[in-house]
Amino acid sequence: MPRKREGFEKQITILGIAIMLRKTRFSSASILSLAATSLQLAPLLILLLSLSNATLAHAQRKKQICQYITKSGERKQVRSLHQVPTRYRRHARCFDASAGQPQNIHLAKPNKIRLAGNTRRESLSTSVGTIELRWPRSVETLFGRTPMRAMAAAAQTVSRSLRTAAFPSDLQRLNLDWQVVFMDADLPQTQIPAKLVGNCHPGWMTPPANIYIVGQRVAAGCGGARASKASVADSDLAEVLVHEMGHAVEYFMLRKAPRHNRMRAEGFATWFEMHAAKQSSLLSASGLKRKTAARARQSLREQPNRFTFGGSAQDYARASMYFLAIEDKRGVRGVMDVYQTMITERMSFLPAIRKELYWSDDQ
């Protein structure tokens, strides 16, 4: 041990003794005995302190993600439980996003995802194609409807929406092979990338028509506060399913060669929810519009000048306003024209809007 460090450690030990002496009365012999014992134990105490500091440093290096849902229903994500407001900590969910998972892990196909406990497998023949479903029995307790009934209702809603508006004829005849899996909160981390395990999204879709739904996130959000009524959970499930099916619709619209733009993709799917809700017995079109408009206004207050898409519910809502504005101006046909311009002119989303509708960036 270097002399300077050894001298410093002895000074710390003696200082500790002096502090104790000010508060306690001892005899001279006791003082000398205590001092001698303290000096002998100093190396052990310092070793324990070093180990404690190393453990603390390791804990601080661990990448932790915690999610919670606010009183207003907004989903939040922070980097530690200490950053979660006290009133939300009881229902917060935290994940270790640091080690234990390879960086290059790929998302397994829905029919390959491992499900715990008793599971069910069903095949549905619908007007938008054949849907292969799998789910664990534990998910059934979260909703009033079984996943199969919810999926059938969502497929019917999407089909009606495509056939009662100005969508192209090939979209009206949409017929895909869908693979859908419903999962519980304990996601298989060796089959799902950490960014999906740790984020707050209730569902996701991969082309051409693979859909993954996390039952607890639909029914309880990030905070674990389960919906008070099964009908509310069913409505939330229908909303998520239609949203994810909307991603498949957009993929087909882009002729299976999507230009990567998350803002556009989530904006379209969120708009498609509201549009399809007009054909649903579970979804409220007016209620969805009010909720989306409120979230978009919040995003506008937070980013009044330049919009940077970060993936929050408020960002989804604000991105959908582009589509609502186009629909208000030119109907669904106008949305289709913008996508046609994107394809034929090889343009991204916003330049295609400017070209097709002659809108400026301010508009």
Image: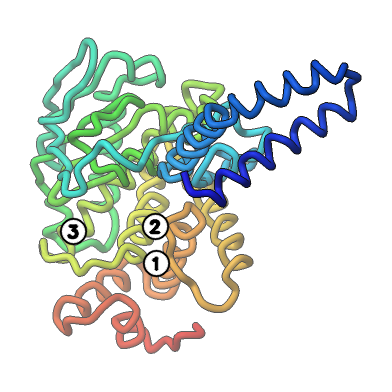
Mark 1: few/some/many CA within 10 Å (<14, 14-19, 20+): many
Q: Residue 158 appears at what percent x and percent y?
A: 27, 45
Q: Secondary structure at mark 2?
A: helix
Q: Which residue is mark 1?
A: 323
* Residue at image point 32% right, 38% down: 197
Position of 101 compared to 268: left or right? left
Q: Which residue is mark 3?
A: 251
* Residue at image point 39% right, 67% down: 323
Quadrant assignment, res 295: bottom right
Q: Which residue is mark 2?
A: 271
Q: Secondary structure at mark 3?
A: helix
Residue contact between numbered discs 2 and 1, judged by CB atoms under 8 Å: yes
- Type of amino acid at the residue the image marks with label 3: Tyr
Alpha-carbon distance for marks 3 and 1? Answer: 16 Å
Q: Secondary structure at mark 1?
A: helix
Q: Nearer the viewer, residue 108 or 110?
A: 108
Sooner in the amino-acid sequence: mark 2 or mark 1: 2
| Mark seen at residue 247 | none
Q: Residue 167 appears at what percent x and percent y?
A: 23, 61
Q: Nearer the viewer, residue 231 or 141?
A: 141
Position of 112 compared to 308: left or right? left
Sooner in the amino-acid sequence: mark 3 or mark 1: 3
Sooner in the amino-acid sequence: mark 2 or mark 3: 3
